[in-house]
Image (cartoon, rainbow, N blue to C red):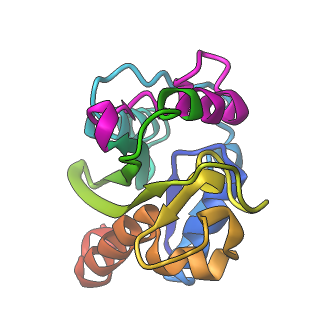
Amino acid sequence: MKELVFASANKHKVDEVAAKLGGQVHLLGLTDIGCTEEIQETASTLEGNALIKARFVFDRFNKKCFADDTGLEVEVLNGQPGVFSARYAGDARSSEANIEKLFTELHYETNRKAQFRTVICLIIAGEVHFFEGIVKGHIARERRGNSGFGYDPVFIPEGSSRSFAEMNLEEKNILSHRALAIGKMKKFLSHSQLMNS
């Protein structure tokens, strides 16, 4: 089976993506290839950060790889926190602090529309490809559920009465932003000869 590296040290994310790829490739995370460095995400866009991470792994380890960056974009906050979602409340990257800051920002707001957007950058044989997944929804007024990570306890996707954190992995994989982007990449890989190069 062909190996593909996901430029993430987050086991939750690696497991989530591996489940979505469904055995199409042997998926490795950063720890699996011995990469212990923290890749600095210094771009001002999700596309830029995904490219930085994928390029780092491709250049340093010479492996077929992809990276993603995800942002929670809240309508009334003009798309914030966006590219700064992970460090919205500071460099400590605390999910609890990020959610608290979001609740504070939206305290008096009736418009709680938001979307999760994931951008994937795939590098194979030196070629760069981007894939995007968007899921629209709204921000709940309290945390709900214990699964998932990040903003999952407060994001309720359109057409559902439950937050991402109230869903199991299989349910979330059907409609999440990352799942949509991964689905596009999976389709590309199934029709591409680049994995054999």
Indicate whether 196 appears above or below 117: below
Can residue 1 be seen in this snapshot? no
Measuring from the top left, give residue 78's x and y in whole percent. 26, 32
The N terminus lies in quadrant: bottom right
Q: Nearer the viewer, residue 50 or 30?
A: 50
Asked which quadrant contains residue 49, the reply is top left
Q: Nearer the viewer, residue 57 or 14?
A: 14
Q: Is residue 99 magenta?
A: yes
Viewed as shown, does residue 116 lie left or right of 18?
A: left
The residue that appears at 32% across and 69% down in the rendered structure is 185
Indicate whether 133 appears above or below 37: below
The residue that appears at 26% across and 69% down in the rendered structure is 194
The C terminus lies in quadrant: bottom left
Point out the stretch of residues depicted in magenta. 75-102
Asked which quadrant contains residue 48, the reply is top left
Measuring from the top left, give residue 43's x and y in whole percent. 31, 23
Q: Is residue 97 magenta?
A: yes
Viewed as shown, does residue 96 lie left or right of 45?
A: right
Query: Across the whole image, how many numbered discs are drawn on residues?
Result: 0
